[in-house]
C-alpha cells in the first residue's frame, strides 16, 4: 500500500487481517476511519484496547466478559437449575437473542474433535462437571452444533452426567447439520430448544 504512505498502509494491513475482511473492504474501512472526527476514531481505538485488555472468562459459565460473573450469571432473574451447554460465546448470544431462554449457560469453547487433536481436556468440560457437583441443577440442555463432533460431544457429556441423576436433553434436530448456531434464525433456534428430547 505504498501509494497511501506508511500509516494508512498499516491501517489497511491491520484491518485486512480481520476475519471476513478482504483487501477492498479493508481499504473502505480505513478511509471511513480516516474521515471520522478524531474523537470517534479515538473512541473506536480505545474500545478495541479496553475490550482486549479487560476480557476474561466468567467464573461460572466461562463465557467471555469483563467481570468476574457475566451479566447473565449475575442476574437474579435467571433460573440456575437449568443449564444450556453451548460451544461458543457466539452461540450463547444467538440463544439470548431468542429472548426466551431463562436458564443459565455453560460455554465449552469448542467440541471434542480427535481429527484436530482437540480432546476432552481442551474444552471446558471438567469445569462443567465440577459445577454440576457444586450446584443444584435439574436439567442440562446440550446445545452443541449438529456436526458429527457436536453430536459426539453431546453423547459424551450425557453419558458422563447420567449417573448424577440430572436430566439431560438435546436440542431438536431442526438445526441444520453442521450449521453454525450463530447463523440460524431465532425461530429455528427456539423450535430446536422447545423440541428438545431427553437423552
Ligand atoms: Zn456467566
Image (tube, grey):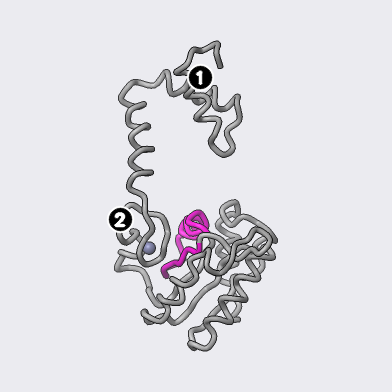
Residue under pointer 1: 9
- Can you say whether 120 is above or below 116 in the image? below
Quadrant location of the N terminus in the rendered image: top right
Choose mark 1 or mark 2, whichever is in front: 1
Give percent across and percent down for residue 180: 61, 55
Crowding at dot 2, Cα within 10 Å, few <14 / some 14-19 / many 20+, comes out as: some
Give percent across and percent down for residue 159: 58, 82
Q: Is residue 132 left or right of residue 50?
A: right
Q: Is residue 143 left or right of residue 138?
A: right
Q: Residue at x 50, y 29 (%)?
A: 14
Q: Is residue 90 magenta?
A: yes
Instruction: State the extent of the magenta-drawn residues as a range.
Output: 88-108
Residue under pointer 2: 67
- Can you say whether 68 is above or below 24 in the image? below
Q: Residue at x 48, y 20 (%)?
A: 31
Q: Residue at x 60, y 81 (%)?
A: 199
Give percent across and percent down for residue 110: 55, 60
Tag 2 secondary structure: loop
Amino acid at each position: 500500500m505504498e501509494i497511501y504512505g506508511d500509516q494508512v498502509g498499516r491501517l489497511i494491513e491491520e484491518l485486512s487481517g480481520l476475519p471476513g475482511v478482504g483487501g477492498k473492504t479493508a481499504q473502505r474501512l480505513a478511509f471511513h476511519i480516516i474521515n471520522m472526527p478524531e474523537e470517534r476514531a479515538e473512541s473506536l481505538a480505545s474500545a478495541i484496547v479496553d475490550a482486549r485488555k479487560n476480557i476474561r472468562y466468567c467464573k461460572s459459565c466461562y463465557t467471555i466478559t469483563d467481570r468476574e460473573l457475566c451479566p447473565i450469571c449475575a442476574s437474579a432473574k435467571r433460573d440456575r437449575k437449568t443449564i444450556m451447554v453451548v460451544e461458543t460465546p457466539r452461540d450463547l448470544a444467538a440463544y439470548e437473542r431468542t429472548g426466551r431462554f431463562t436458564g443459565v449457560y455453560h460455554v465449552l469453547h469448542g467440541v471434542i474433535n480427535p481429527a484436530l487433536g482437540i480432546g476432552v481436556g481442551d474444552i471446558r468440560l471438567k469445569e462443567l462437571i465440577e459445577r454440576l457437583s457444586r450446584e443444584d441443577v435439574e436439567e442440562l440442555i446440550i446445545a452443541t452444533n449438529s456436526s458429527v463432533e457436536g453430536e459426539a460431544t453431546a453423547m459424551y457429556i450425557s453419558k458422563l452426567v447420567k449417573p448424577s441423576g440430572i436430566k439431560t436433553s438435546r436440542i431438536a434436530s431442526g438445526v441444520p447439520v453442521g450449521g453454525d448456531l450463530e447463523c440460524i434464525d431465532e425461530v429455528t433456534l427456539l423450535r430446536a430448544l422447545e423440541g428438545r428430547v431427553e437423552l
